[in-house]
C-alpha cells in the first residue's frame, strides 16, 4: 500500500492533536462537575414528604438524623438541575392548552407537623381535560428511557410507588382529591400524563409513618439484613448498615443529647434549649455519639454525667465534652483513640 500523504511524522502529529483535544474536553467536564459538587446542598432540615414512600424506615431515620448524608457526583447534580428546569417548560405547555395554575411565589409548602413537610410542584385550579372544574396537585418528573418505558407499561403506582406516595401525601395536606402526574422522557421528549385519585387511608398512614420515624429516639430495624438485597445494594446507608455500623457525621442530630420533638424543633438536653438550624450542622465540643450510630457497646456514663463510656476493642473509652482522658466524637470516628 502507498504510504499516507505526509508520512508517519504527520500521522503522529495528527494523533497528538486529537489526544490534546480529548484531554482539554475532559478537563472542562471535570471542572464543571467539580464546581457542581462544591455547591452541594445541605441535607434537608425536615422529613421530606417526597421520601415517605421509601421502603426502609431505617434510611428515613438515618437521613433525617444526618447520620448518613448522601453526596452526589457533579453529573448527577446536573441531572437534578435539568429536572428542575423542566418544570417551567411543562407548566408553560399545560397553560398553553388552557390549564390554570394557582399563582404562587415558587413552590407551595405543605406542613404536616412533627418535622414532616414538602413542596408541591404546582396546584391546578381548573382546565384539566376530563375534569375541567376539579383542582389537582401537579407533580412533574423527568425519566431516562428505561424508566419511562416502565412507567408507560405499569402506571405510576406500580412503576414509581414513591412518586405515587408523594402525591397522596400532598393531596392529603392540601385537601385536594385529584393529582396530575406529568413525566417527560429525556431521550426523546415523549410525555406521559396520569390522573390519580386521593386515597385517604394510604395518605394518612404515610404521614403518620413520617411523624413516627422523625421523633423516634432509637434507630429502626433495616429493611433487610442481607447486604445483597436489591434495595440495599445501592442505598447510601449500605456501608453503615452492613459494614461499619458507624456514622461519619458529627452534628447535633447524631448527638445523644439531642431530641426531635413533636412540636417540630430539636432540643438539647445538655444546654437546655431549642437548637437553631445553623448550630445543628456544626454541633459542639460536648458532642456524644448516639449509641445507635456506633458499633460499640455502651457501658453507661462517666462521673461527669454528660459523657458516654463505650467499650472499644476491649477497653473503656470516654466520649463527650473535652477533659482529661476524653475522646472526641471526631477522634472516635477517625480511629484516633
Image (cartoon, rainbow, N blue to C red):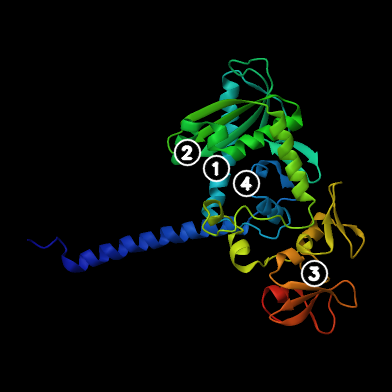
Label 2, label 3: how far apart the Cα atoms are: 46 Å
Label 1, label 2: how far apart the Cα atoms are: 10 Å
The image position of residue 34, as x and y in percent, is 55, 60
Do the residues bearing badges 1 and 2 touch, measured as CB atoms within 8 Å? yes
Q: Residues within 10 Å of mark 2 (few under 14, many from 20)?
A: some
Label 1 or label 2, whichever lies nearer to me, is: 2
Do the residues bearing badges 1 and 4 touch, measured as CB atoms within 8 Å? no
Label 1, label 3: how far apart the Cα atoms are: 40 Å
Assign the N terminus to one quadrant of the image.
bottom left
Q: Sequence-wise, which precedes: disc 2 or disc 4? A: 4
Q: Can residue 170 be seen in this view?
A: no
Give the residue pinned by disc 4. Answer: 55
Residue in front for this viewpoint, 278 or 335: 335
Q: What element carries label 4?
A: loop
Q: In this view, does 17 lie above or below 322?
A: above
Label 2 or label 3, whichever lies nearer to me, is: 3
Q: Is residue 213 visible?
A: yes
Label 3 or label 4, whichever lies nearer to me, is: 4
Label 3, label 4: how far apart the Cα atoms are: 29 Å
Q: Is residue 172 above or below residue 74?
A: above
Q: What element carries label 3?
A: loop
The quarter of the picture where residue 133 lies is top right
Assign the C terminus to one quadrant of the image.
bottom right
- Residue at figure coordinates x 55%, y 42% from the top left: 82
Do the residues bearing badges 3 and 4 touch, measured as CB atoms within 8 Å? no
Q: Sequence-wise, which precedes: disc 1 or disc 3? A: 1
Q: In this view, does 92 lie above or below 323?
A: above
- Residue at figure coordinates x 70%, y 24% from the top left: 177
The image position of residue 314, as x and y in percent, is 71, 82
Amino acid at each position: 500500500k502507498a504510504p499516507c500523504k505526509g508520512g508517519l511524522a504527520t500521522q503522529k502529529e495528527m494523533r497528538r492533536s486529537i489526544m490534546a483535544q480529548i484531554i482539554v474536553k475532559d478537563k472542562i467536564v471535570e471542572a464543571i462537575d467539580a464546581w457542581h459538587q462544591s455547591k452541594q446542598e445541605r441535607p434537608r432540615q425536615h422529613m421530606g414528604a417526597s421520601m415517605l414512600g421509601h421502603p426502609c424506615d431505617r434510611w428515613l431515620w438515618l437521613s433525617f438524623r444526618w447520620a448518613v448524608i448522601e453526596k452526589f457526583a457533579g453529573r448527577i447534580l446536573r441531572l437534578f438541575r435539568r429536572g428542575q428546569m423542566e418544570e417551567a417548560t411543562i407548566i408553560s405547555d399545560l397553560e398553553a392548552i388552557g390549564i390554570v395554575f394557582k399563582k404562587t411565589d415558587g413552590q407551595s409548602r405543605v406542613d404536616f407537623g412533627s418535622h414532616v413537610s414538602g413542596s408541591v410542584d404546582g396546584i391546578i385550579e381548573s382546565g384539566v381535560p376530563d375534569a375541567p372544574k376539579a383542582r389537582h396537585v401537579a407533580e412533574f418528573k423527568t425519566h431516562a428511557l428505561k424508566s419511562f418505558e416502565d412507567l408507560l407499561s405499569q402506571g405510576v403506582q406500580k412503576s414509581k410507588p414513591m412518586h405515587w406516595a408523594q402525591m397522596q401525601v400532598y393531596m392529603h395536606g392540601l385537601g385536594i382529591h385529584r393529582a396530575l402526574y406529568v413525566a417527560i422522557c429525556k431521550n426523546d421528549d415523549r410525555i406521559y400524563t396520569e390522573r390519580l385519585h386521593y386515597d385517604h387511608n394510604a395518605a394518612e398512614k404515610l404521614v403518620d409513618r413520617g411523624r413516627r420515624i422523625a421523633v423516634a429516639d432509637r434507630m429502626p430495624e433495616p429493611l433487610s439484613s442481607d447486604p445483597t438485597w436489591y434495595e440495599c445494594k445501592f442505598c447510601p446507608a449500605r456501608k453503615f448498615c452492613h459494614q461499619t455500623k458507624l456514622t461519619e457525621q458529627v452534628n447535633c442530630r447524631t448527638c445523644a443529647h439531642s431530641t426531635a420533638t413533636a412540636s417540630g424543633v430539636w432540643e438539647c438536653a445538655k444546654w437546655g434549649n431549642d437548637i437553631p438550624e445553623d448550630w445543628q450542622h456544626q454541633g459542639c465540643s460536648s458532642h456524644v455519639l448516639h449509641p445507635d450510630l456506633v458499633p460499640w457497646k455502651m457501658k453507661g456514663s462517666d462521673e461527669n454525667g454528660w459523657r458516654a463510656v463505650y467499650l472499644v476493642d476491649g477497653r473503656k473509652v470516654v466520649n463527650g465534652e473535652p477533659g482529661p482522658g476524653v475522646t472526641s466524637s471526631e477522634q472516635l470516628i477517625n480511629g484516633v483513640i
